[in-house]
Amino acid sequence: MRSSKFCLNIAGDTPSSNRLFDAIASHCIPVIISDDIELPYEDVLNYNEFCLFVRSSDAIKKGFLMGLVKSIGREEYNKMWLRLKEVERYFDLRFPSKDDEGDYAVQMIWKAVARKAPLVKMKVHRFQRFTRPF
């Protein structure tokens, strides 16, 4: 992966996988093949800046993937790669962190939980609208 420019991230039979994290750690632009993948920190990070997304129906077309990666020019690739390097720290889950600036990945996880908690509570309240305690 370390010597590749692009790495496939194919949807599997489980909702989570290490493929994305491995690609980012290897500084390899993820090519995500999925129609409805849910990505970590997506409410904060714009994955379009450092990933390519491919619909499953397009991925199976002959030559589509090769055409896609070949269409990425040097300037666009460099921009994506630099952004990938910037966001890498949010996916580094080592403890203690490798730098003195703090453990960004753990901070991002807690911030994501804090942002989602009110939404979960709201959904529970909405679900309970038409139920009455007995």
Image (cartoon, rainbow, N blue to C red):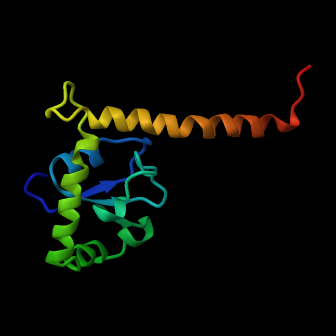
- Judged from this view, the residue extending furthest toward the right is 134
Image point (14%, 33%), residue name: 98
Specify the farthest residue to the top.
134
Quadrant of the rendered structure where residue 51 is?
bottom left
Q: Is 65 situated above or below 26?
A: below
User: Residue at 36% of width from left, 68% of height from top?
Assistant: 59
Closer to the camera in the image, 114 or 11: 114
Residue 16 left/right relative to 102: right
Q: Quadrant of residue 64?
A: bottom left
Give the image location of residue 82, x and y in percent: 18, 61
Q: Quadrant of the C terminus?
A: top right
Percent of width and height locating residue 118:
61, 37
Give the residue at x 22% y 50%.
24
Q: Position of residue 94 (x, y in %)?
A: 21, 30
Q: Is residue 15 left or right of residue 1?
A: right
What residue sits 50% from the left and 35% below the top?
114
